[in-house]
Image (cartoon, coloured by chain):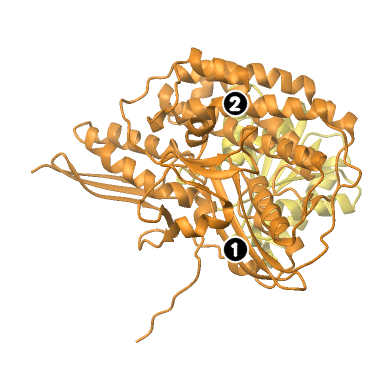
Chain colours: A orange, B yellow
Amino acid sequence: MNSKTIKVETLARVEGEAALTIRIQGDKVTEVKFRIYEPPRFFEALLKGRHYSEAADITARICGICPVAYQMSAVHAIERALGIHIDPAVRMLRRLFYCGEWIESHALHVYMLHAPDFLGYEDAIRMASDHRALVEQGLRLKKLGNQIVTLLGGREIHPVSAAVGGFYKVPAKRTVRELEPELEWALEASLATVKFVAGFEFPDFERDYEFVALAHPEEYPLCEGRLVSSSGLNIDAAEYEDRFVEQHVKYSNALHSVVRGRGSYFVGPLARVNLNFDKLPAPAREAARAAGFQPPVRNPFRSIVARALELVFACAEALRVIREYQPPDLPRVEAASCGGVGQAITEAPRGILYHRYALDASGLILAARIVPPTSQNQRVIEDDLREFAAQVAAWPLEEATWKCEQAIRNYDPCISCATHFLRLEVERD
Amino acid sequence: MKIIGCGNVDRGDDAAGLLVARRLREWGIDAVEECGGGFALIDSWAGAGDVVLVDAVVSGRPPGSITVWDAGMSPPPADRRTSSSHGFGVAQAVRLARVLGRMPRSLIIYGIEGRNFDLGSAASAEVIEASESVARRLAATASCTCSPPPAGFC
């Protein structure tokens, strides 16, 4: 019987370092290992004993691509623990803050990391030789996202202004409105992006996933909503740990999250668009229809289209916020009490990000729990590869390897975010 | 001349470029700091005339060794193993900027050889000494109207 091993020691065009091994006997896949070898980072342990006001800045350090997501999940969880209700203007600013991160992260992935797969280039630099305008457009979108994050967070990477109860400093109305012309361009560029990526050739591959995302009755989800799934899940963030569990696998430094009693699930842009299509702004819905993107879409390779649709949403939403923005009376509200337990889920660019904090009466963190999106997608990535590798088993090895790498990039995994352990268990004889 | 120091002050010898930028500012010479992310670098040198960039490098030479490249002539070698977005650093930024026509008029890169990049560690004595040396050289260049120094091993 023919055997083949697809092995990639260092995956290209993902956020961080990971490896892939797939063993195939005949037309059967016998082993799939998506191995995250970056060292674990123990952020949950680092948080213990620190004051709740430090959590946003500490957890922002988990990721240079999506620090806003960590800050938003942290402050919302702590605000729930402390019973804080934020000013509506602050809530709007947080949506703008998050839109900035979605724009920079999605632009980076669509243009620089994923488009080269579909256009047949090893990387974005080689792609730029033939598609200069395309790369320039991606860089300009990414820069705009960074500008929004800088405006609200003080700097583009690991911003420093997010606080429990609001922000340490909020921008003036005039400063916010200065973003308008570039956002108007970005909205048009995003619509063109949807049309462009929808024209890519997608492998014929579909699976019956459980898509999981936040859902809000009035808006496309960012920071609030119930957690719903295509299999009927509908819970509050406080119930998350009752329904999901992280499992350790020997070969990876990242835990695999599964739905208790069911298994893998799918988070991120494709899940969000499938579960919240009617909450997308009208231009995004029209672009989707024109592109033949009719939810539910179960081909993970078409995640790039969902990500482009979310670029449209993020630009449209940012425009709405800056046009309606009135600075709050106070940049943040103070907590009346200190102790409690709070959970929150927000939508990071790659999918849901869960935080839980237990605080003592002096506001010190007794326990912290963080489940990043890539931990949640790891198992479904392996499940995809188990089926997809069988489809490409007869292909030349180099081509099959590329396609399997591309299948991982469908999820835009953030490896560095995912490397955490709940606890260390030392076994001795 | 625009001077850019790259690095992370909490990653041992990776602080090299930042040490140079900070010393120059103490002497009243403009120098900006960047984390070394390639996309930010392209923006940082956009529209600039002559640019000097200082960063830590790993090439196997002794710690504190200084290498100078003229990126307009040939980009610094990229480590092909770091092909993730986290590896999109100076070398990749130069390559992309060349393709896009977004290079400054001239770009001289000073690489200071590092060995220890542990989280939370301080820069080694060799790298601190080399950073002082590079800062003195750039201060001398910045204070006169002559061109940046020629590329080559120092």
Which chain does the numbered disc 2 sit on? A
Which chain does the numbered disc 1 sit on? A
B33 shown above or below A137: below
**Quadrant of residue B11 within the rendered picture:** bottom right
Upstream in sequence: badge 1 or badge 2: 1
Residue A204: mark in rendering: none
Spatial CA distance of label 1 from label 2 is: 34 Å
- The extreme top residue here reads A290
Residue at 36%, 51% (x, y): give it. A263
Residue A416: x, y in percent?
53, 52
Secondary element under disc 2, as helix, strand or loop, is: loop
Residue B3: x, y in percent?
78, 41
The residue under label 1 is A43
A355 shown above or below A303: below
The residue under label 2 is A280
Residue A37 in sight in this render: no
Closer to the camera in the image, A412 or B38: A412
Residue A110: x, y in percent?
53, 29
Classify residue A179 as left or right of residue A142: right
Residue at 51%, 39% (x, y): give it. A268
**Quadrant of residue A58 within the rendered picture:** bottom right
- The extreme bottom residue here reads A429
Residue A273: x, y in percent?
52, 30
